[in-house]
Image (cartoon, rainbow, N blue to C red):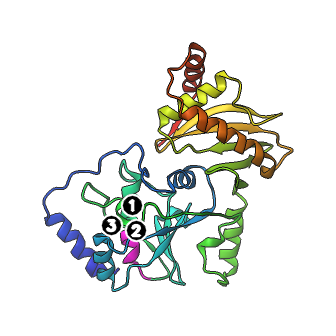
């Protein structure tokens, strides 16, 4: 986007009536089919991409694309992080990348992402998107711009190679910088037997973090039922450490046997998922033992927002 058009937009915004600030949203990606994986990519996964299908009938997308003299793309790539924590990047080969691990300026990560997405469509190929201003109550949310129920398969990476077009020729300095960044990646694997569960190796320890698509309180109750029944383990050498909350979702965390890799836990995770779903649909009041288990989970719970 040229300086003239940026100044015009800033002037228009300054002359427009005051717009309310974007409201806080505790569960910002609710309603999207890939909600749990989106939260994982924002909070715990170092290097991954996923395809977001755009709504061709979304008025904000159509208007923004027209301003930039482009067509609304069928899809964009949602990515964990970009260089310098850029909010978005229009790669040199024309691919649109929208970063999740960037600075949030409002209390609604979905609105921040949509704000960056609109700026991305105005950004020439080979440049990062640099949104002017911040999202406000009039800014659309990601749910307004993408096909909410479209599948969103996640592709995991061991490096940040997705920052560059395939076959891109990096100079020595860029290659060295990329190598240094790659070395800081925590080895992470997405399990195949259950949805939104991520194994990782941190130093000499390994963990499983499983994002729950249920309401936070319902998921906490289900986990408490399993703890009280001594059914919250994943086999020998494992233990439930507790759970944290991220973007309105509960994320149980297990300590695992460091001698085993992620695939060794596929069957145990599938069995756990079946137990968890059964507990989640139970509507009976918590027993005294289950309430004590719930209080124990809450007493050591952290919140990521």
The disc label shown at residue 42, or none: none
| Residue 115 point in image, percent of width and height | 36, 63
Q: Nearest to the eye among marks 1 and 3: give it.
A: 1
Q: Residue at x 40, y 78 (%)?
A: 123
Marked residue nearer the N-terminal end (2 or 1): 2
Q: Nearest to the eye among marks 3 and 2: give it.
A: 2
Whether residues under marks 2 and 1 lie with C-beta atoms below 8 angstroms apart, the answer is yes
> Residue 243: which quarter of the image?
top right
Whether residues under marks 1 and 3 lie with C-beta atoms below 8 angstroms apart, the answer is no
Between the C-alphas of marks 2 and 1, the distance is: 8 Å
Marked residue nearer the N-terminal end (3 or 2): 2
Determine which residue is flagged by label 3: 132
Up-down relation of residue 165 to residue 283 (above or below): below
Q: The magenta stretch spans which residues?
A: 117-124
Determine which residue is flagged by label 1: 142
Q: Judging from the image, what secondary structure is the residue with disc 2 in? A: helix
Q: Residue at x 70, y 55 (%)?
A: 192
Q: Is residue 37 visible?
A: yes
Q: Judging from the image, what secondary structure is the residue with disc 3 in? A: loop
| Residue 6 point in image, percent of width and height | 28, 75
Q: Judging from the image, what secondary structure is the residue with disc 1 in? A: helix
Determine which residue is flagged by label 2: 117
Crowdedness of circle 2 by 10 Å Cα count: few (<14), some, many (20+)?
many
Q: Nearer the viewer, residue 242 or 87?
A: 242
């Amino acid at each position: 986007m040229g300086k003239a058009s940026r100044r015009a937009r800033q002037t228009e915004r300054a002359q427009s009536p005051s717009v309310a600030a974007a409201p806080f949203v505790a569960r910002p990606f609710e309603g999207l089919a890939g909600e749990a994986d989106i939260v994982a990519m924002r909070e715990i996964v170092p290097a991954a991409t996923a395809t977001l299908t755009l709504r061709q009938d979304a008025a904000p997308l159509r208007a923004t694309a027209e301003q930039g003299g482009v067509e609304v793309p069928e899809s964009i790539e949602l990515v964990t992080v970009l260089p310098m924590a850029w909010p978005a990047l229009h790669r040199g080969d024309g691919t649109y990348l929208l970063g999740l691990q960037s600075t949030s300026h409002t209390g609604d990560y979905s609105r921040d992402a949509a704000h960056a997405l609109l700026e991305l469509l105005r950004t020439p190929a080979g440049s990062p998107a640099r949104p002017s201003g911040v999202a406000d109550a009039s800014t659309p949310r990601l749910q307004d711009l993408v096909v909410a129920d479209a599948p969103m398969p996640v592709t995991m990476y061991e490096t940040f190679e997705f920052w560059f077009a395939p076959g891109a020729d990096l100079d020595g300095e860029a290659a060295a910088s990329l190598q240094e960044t790659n070395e800081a990646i925590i080895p992470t694997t997405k399990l195949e037997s259950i949805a939104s569960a991520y194994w990782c190796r941190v130093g000499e320890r390994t963990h499983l973090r499983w994002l729950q698509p249920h309401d936070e309180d319902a998921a906490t109750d289900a986990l408490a039922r399993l703890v009280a029944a001594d059914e919250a383990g994943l086999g020998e050498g494992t233990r439930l450490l507790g759970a944290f909350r991220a973007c309105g979702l509960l994320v149980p965390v297990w300590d695992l046997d460091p001698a085993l890799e992620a695939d060794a836990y596929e069957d145990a995770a599938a069995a756990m998922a079946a137990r968890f779903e059964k507990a989640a649909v139970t509507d009976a009041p918590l027993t005294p033992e289950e309430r004590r288990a719930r209080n124990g989970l809450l007493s050591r719970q952290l919140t990521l927002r």
